[in-house]
Image (cartoon, rainbow, N blue to C red):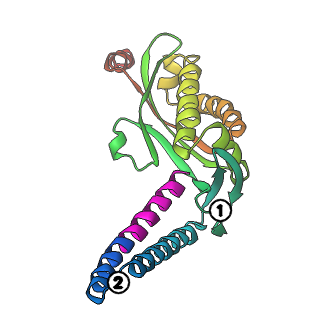
Amino acid sequence: MGQLISSVIFALILGGGVAVLLGGMLAARGQRRGGGSPSVRASLIIGLLIALGSFGGLALVDSYTQVEYGTVAVVTQFGRVVTTFQPGLNWKIPFVQDTITYRTQEITYETSEGPDLSQADYRDVEADTATADGQQIRVRYTIRFRILPERALDVAQNLGTEERAVEKVVKAESRSIVRNTLKRYSASQLYSGDVEAAQRAIADLLEPEFSENGLEMTFFGLRSIIFTDAYRQAVENKQI
């Protein structure tokens, strides 16, 4: 609706500006020839035609949208989702319908010590938690997921944009489940490097949460678990 109002205002300003400019020129010429009102009427008609033409041109440009490969577009109309556009050229009602684009290719979310250096699509800081015996740890992990094209309407309706889906599901659920799951393991179990059981347990909890919200998790990996310097020193002293 906002785009419709903006287009109408633009067309009126353009047509009005042309009418005023042309009217002034014709009026000046008419005064030299002894007439005036036909020139004013002619300028108003020309201005109206220009306004209608510019509005029609804007409507034509807004009547189609091109969806790129690897994405899907959800069509919204007056605040509600109505349909989905597949990759290619798609036609829509100008100024009434709008689109929200979602990537259907794999998207990467990653926690790390230096998020600015990560190459992931969505970067975050490490998750912090404690082990079953009270040792503080920081966790770095990677998630690869995709938005299911057949569930894009649900994602738009329940979560919003792709960024909001990542914030509400991928980030919130993964950080919570990672923290709570690792609390069930002792520091010695995680420090030994044998974290496959914990990784599988986290993935098993995340997959249904993603699926329920229209996402498909294709990979979860615990890249590293970082212990405090004091704990690492204590383990080394014990080994010595």
- Give how far across and how far down residue 88 sits, in percent: 64, 70
Quarter location, residue 72: bottom right
- Give how far across and how far down residue 108 sits, in percent: 51, 47
Looking at the image, can residue 53 be seen? yes
The residue depicted at 49 percent of the width and 72 percent of the height is: 48
Q: Nearer the viewer, residue 67 or 137?
A: 67
What SS does tag 1 mark? loop
Quarter location, residue 204: top right
Quarter location, residue 164: top right
Q: Which residues are magenta?
A: 1-18
The residue depicted at 52 percent of the width and 35 percent of the height is: 167
Q: Earlier in the sequence, mark 1 or mark 2?
A: 2
Tell me if residue 11 is in the magenta stretch. yes
Looking at the image, residue 165 sits to the left or right of residue 152; the answer is left
Up the image or down, 143 lies above or below 238; here it is: below
The residue that mark 1 highlights is 93
Magenta stretch, overall SS:
helix
Looking at the image, residue 177 sits to the left or right of residue 236; the answer is right
What SS does tag 2 mark? loop
The residue depicted at 47 percent of the width and 41 percent of the height is: 110
Query: Which mark lies nearer to you, 1 or 2?
Result: 2
Up the image or down, 87 lies above or below 196; here it is: below
Q: Nearer the viewer, residue 29 or 107?
A: 29
The residue that mark 2 highlights is 35
Q: Amino acid at mark 1?
A: Ile
- Give how far across and how far down residue 81 sits, in percent: 68, 47
The residue depicted at 28 percent of the width and 83 percent of the height is: 31
